[in-house]
Amino acid sequence: MVVCVCNALKERDVRDAARSGCQSPLAAYAALGRRPQCGQCIPFARALIAEERAGQPA
């Protein structure tokens, strides 16, 4: 599924960034060499990152 149309980021890209330690959408985008443009994707990216973080032991 596409998370960010402006940057052509897919759900797996954001999830991979979260698994690599990114704790926010801005950090995930930076790790992927991108930055948010219109911002409509931020809530969805935030939710994906939270899901990934919840699935990992603290």
Image (cartoon, rainbow, N blue to C red):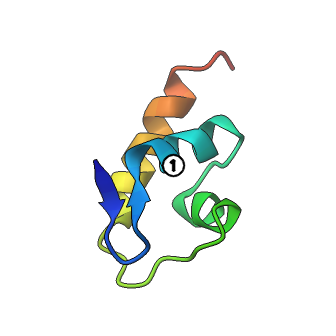
Q: Secondary structure at mark 1?
A: helix
- Give percent across and percent down for residue 6: 36, 78
Q: Is residue 33 left or right of residue 10?
A: right
x 58%, y 40%: residue: 16
- In the depicted structure, whether residue 41 falls above or below residue 19: below
Q: Position of residue 23 (x, y in %)?
A: 63, 48
Question: Which residue occupies the extreme top position in the image?
Answer: 57
Question: Residue placed farthest to the front in the image?
Answer: 8
Answer left or right for 55 relative to 10. right
At a point 70% along the width and 39% down the height, the residue shown is: 20
- Viewer-closest of 7 and 25: 7
User: Is 12 displayed left or right of 4 in the figure?
Assistant: right
Residue flagged by tag 1: what amino acid is it? Asp
* Residue 44 shown left or right of residue 29 in the figure: left
Residue 42 drawn above or below residue 24: below
Which residue is located at x 69 percent, y 20 percent? 58
In the figure, residue 42 lies in which quadrant?
A: bottom left
Residue 5 position, x and y percent, is 31, 71
Residue 32, percent from left and from top: 63, 62
Mark 1: few, some, or many residues within 10 Å (few <14, many ≥20)? some
Number of labelled discs? 1
Name the residue nearer the viewer: 28 or 6: 6
Can you say whether 30 is above or below 14 in the image? below
Location of mark 1 (residue): 13
